[in-house]
Image (spheres, rainbow, N blue to C red):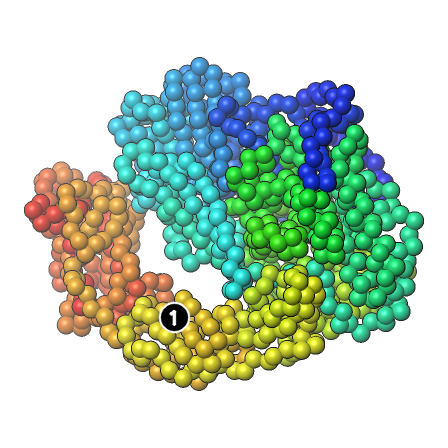
Amino acid sequence: MKKDMQWTKWMVLTALFAFTILGSFTSPAAAATIAVGAGSYTNSLPAGQTGPPATIYKTSNVTGAMPTNDWWSSLAWKAYSDVMFPHPLAVQAKADGLGIGYPVQSGSADAMFGAYVNDFTLGHSAQSNFPDAKVDAFSDWTVSMLFSSGGTMRITTGHGLPFIYCTYAGGLPKLTFPSAPTVWSGSASSSVLGVTINGHHYGLFGPTGSTWSGIGTTTLTNSLNGKSYFSVAVLPDNTAATLNAYKQYAYSFVTNTTSNYSYNSSTSKVSTTYSVTTQAMEGTQTGTIMALYPSQWKNTSTSLLPYTYDSVRGTMKTVAGSSFTTSLTYQGILPYLPAVGSYNNATLNNYIESVRTEANHTVGATDTYWLGKYLGRIANLLPIAQQAGNTAAVANFENYLETTLSSNLTAGTKSNNLFYYNSNWGTLIGYPASYGSNDSLNDHHFHYGYWVRAAAEVARNNPSWASTANYGGMVNMLIKDFANWDRSDTSFPYMRNFDPYAGHSWASGNSEFADGNNQESSSEAINAWSAMILWGQATGNTAIRDAGIYLYTTEVNAVNEYWFNIDGTNFKSGYNHNYSSMIWGGKSVYATWFSADVQAIRGINILPVTAASAYLGYKPSYSAAFLAQTASERGGNAWNMWPDIFWEYQALYDADGAISLFNANPSYTPEDGETKAHTYSFLYNMQALGQVDTSVTANVPTYGVFKKGSTRNYVAYNPGTSAITVTFSDGATLSVPAGSVASSLGTVVTPSGPSITSLSPSSGSAGSTVTVTGSGFGASQGTSSIKFGSAAAAVTSWSNTSITATVPSSLAAGSYNVTVTTSAGTSNAASYTVAGASLSSNVLYARSGSSLSFTAGTAAASDTIASAGGANYDGNPHSPTTYTITGITGTYDATKATAFHLFLDSGTSVGNGVQVQVTYDFNGNGSATRVETYGYFATNDVTGWEDYTQGGGPTSAAGSFANMNNGTITIKVWSAIGNGASSLRVNASSANGQQSTVTIPYK
């Protein structure tokens, strides 16, 4: 993030960072004021102020608001881009074309890198240089750029896409390498090449019938064969099988991407579907191969391919198709904690009074960041004053929030303390600006998130102020600037600061850095999303509320993966910390924009601490390790910078220890956005509530569940005007009065343990549906489970007395105990019998596209079996051609054995031998297999098909046969000996004859 934050008051901004003002601006004599309810903004740049540059590098195809704060934003801000990181690739628009590289991964003591190194430049045969590269189109995670100067080159790239898609006019694709690449597949006369450069493997896909020139040199040119399209893919390895698998999608060009989310309040789940729209440039293939970040593949049920990529975020895993869906649990937030702590009310009131009697709550701050922080400070304190019964402080704090917000949300004839709408970029800029929020459009979610949080607190206390007829319309406009949830509103870009594919937000508006975009204070981003939830709840705007829930849940998930790495799976070897403070497109670092103090490096991703910060305590063991390493790095936990922030963080897992530190340091200086009153009440309330319990959810958005010892404590907030009963996923209920936070430290209905009375039906096949009847299951599933033996079942419906579930497809025939487990315990067992399954056929046909099928092909074709190159690979599959079928359920027939007829032809090659290996994966997950390898078949040197059969059986076999349940069968065919390639007949119909088949011992 381009957030060089100023944490010592009144530090001169230019001492930290110099912002270059692009373009020139003329201050109008009088600003045009546009009313929005009782508030207003100006659409003319205020006198003496600066805004973003007048020039946007885009074509006429791009209309409406211009996205900023994206991984590709530098493309719009300058003639040629800085390095952009559409992982797994890295690219840079240059005068001679698009530089392309597979980032080089490394780790050092304080940084992890996925650094860009140019593997080659994709250029144009008729244009050595272009005057610029312009944005020609964009979607949720792709951008299309146009290089034009006589001849044109249009290139599309995006997050998670191993492919780069290109169309040409007036010339041909010209690829320039730093040295002659190794061509390991294809030749001058083939349309597709497999090449390696700098140890990185690529597929180069020209149109069918196209050829290449320049092989053996540093420049390769594709002829295009009269067509206009061309694509490139970074490959996970340099095998023919992988190249062929990627070739299947090489001509399926991605033309649009969308992420669509939904929030289910009954299950507290956020589902996000990531979809691609494709155009088949040749053939009929749809979809593509997508590389998923850890925050995605850890939370999807979509089947994963075997291909992976290394990235600065960790391992990326792949899926094929047109979409995939993730599912995350929303753990709830609260506007404030219940007053359940054992603190001294007189002491609390003294702390509150010290703030009430301040000369100025704003402490002189006027820019949108620091004024926002002070608004957030008082918004945190107002409900505490209400709990303490300090009516004078309540009136004082309410008045400060309302008058400060109202004044700044009204433009009038002012040139400061107002908001200006720039229609060129489609953005709302507050003045005074800071940290490049005006000229570079940095940090709007950081700044405005505090404003929205303060507005939500005003709305909680004075709903009429928040109506659209008053100031609610201007608050909604602030939200639309940094997180426009309405795709139909083109006055602002969709979700400006949030990257839907990366799963987190970016802070820099222009991303003009060699390491891509960046974000430091993830906690301030999450503060913005929680503010949206509370504002949407307070005003009854479920669209804003649900957008906030999606953003909050998704970014919390990403923060725990990439900033905190709480599972320990994503950081590079050699990096010395259990946390990264700043995420970039091409690196992660242990540093800040503003201080080298370890307290700043750590604390910047904690503050502001509010009742919505419970996510920082989702994994107490990590939180303890985080603070332990912080203390180790600075020589102890006697914090002298932001001590209250660290105590509040500690209170999420060890409130007693945090309270001891607080009481031992009465003269500490609060962090600028904090008060002693808030810290004091937070520590003691958390002491009473206990640690965050993520195993239970609720059917309302504003809730929290905690556990102290063996006692679970439930909390919920009701923003409505009448009492409600909140139901938790473990069956507990909590009555919450109107406009209140209630907790079970008052009254709660304790759930009883689950009990099963019947199953219907009590027998059937794996994959069938069963209804379980009983009691004590809980109103919704949450983290509860139903199991058949040790196998968890997928649930289609769940209520307190009935569960409908799918019998796990992995189960073999036999009897299983069915149990239901909730937080209250495990039920009695009921018996279910899984019947055996049967196949309609046991003959599999080798088909084009590396597949096996129970259905024969329609037109004979042939696949190439790569040469052994003179080596001996007897019994060792080398560059095999692979054929697979999944989802097989059948009963093993011990009276039969594997048999096959594979029709081969080695042409006139002498001394070739082709070998086959058959693998049975009984449950489709690789945990139970049988592998059979057969002796190689010595082909003759006469052109014509020869029949390779199982002969005397396998020469080696590992693993015993078993029944198949959703299993997978794979055959690998390779050259064991010889110097020539061979062909395998595939896709043959019965009329064609000579069908390559495998007969399996199943019925």
Point out the image quarter for the C terminus: bottom left
Side of 520 where 29 appears, left or right: right
* Up-down relation of residue 217 to residue 594 (above or below): above
In this rendering, does residue 801 appear at all? yes
Residue sitting at x 86%, y 62% = 391
Q: 10 Å neighbourhood of mark 1: few (<14), some, or many (≥20)?
A: many
Task: Give 637 or 549, whichever is nearer the viewer.
Answer: 549
Instruction: Residue lying at the far top in this picture: please name it.
Output: 150
Residue sitting at x 31%, y 68% = 767
Find residue 180 and report its horizontal and vertical position in percent.
42, 28
Task: Give 878 or 313, whichever is nearer the viewer.
Answer: 313
The tally of labels here is 1
Find residue 207 and report its horizontal and vertical position in percent.
30, 29
Which residue in the structure is indicated by mark 1? 805
Residue sitting at x 85%, y 44% = 9
In this rendering, does residue 516 appear at all? no
Task: Give 588 or 111, whichever is nearer the viewer.
Answer: 588
Point out the image quarter for the N terminus: top right
Residue sitting at x 86%, y 71% = 344
* Up-down relation of residue 765 to residue 904 (above or below): below
Question: Judging from the image, what secondary structure is the residue with disc 1 in?
Answer: strand
* Up-down relation of residue 14 to residue 383 (above or below): above
Find residue 793 and report its horizontal and vertical position in percent.
40, 70
Side of 339 where 754 appears, left or right: left
Kindly identify the amino acid type of the residue bearing the numbered disc 1.
Answer: Ala
Find residue 631 and report its horizontal and vertical position in percent.
76, 60
Side of 639 where 654 appears, left or right: left
Q: Quadrant of residue 886?
A: bottom left
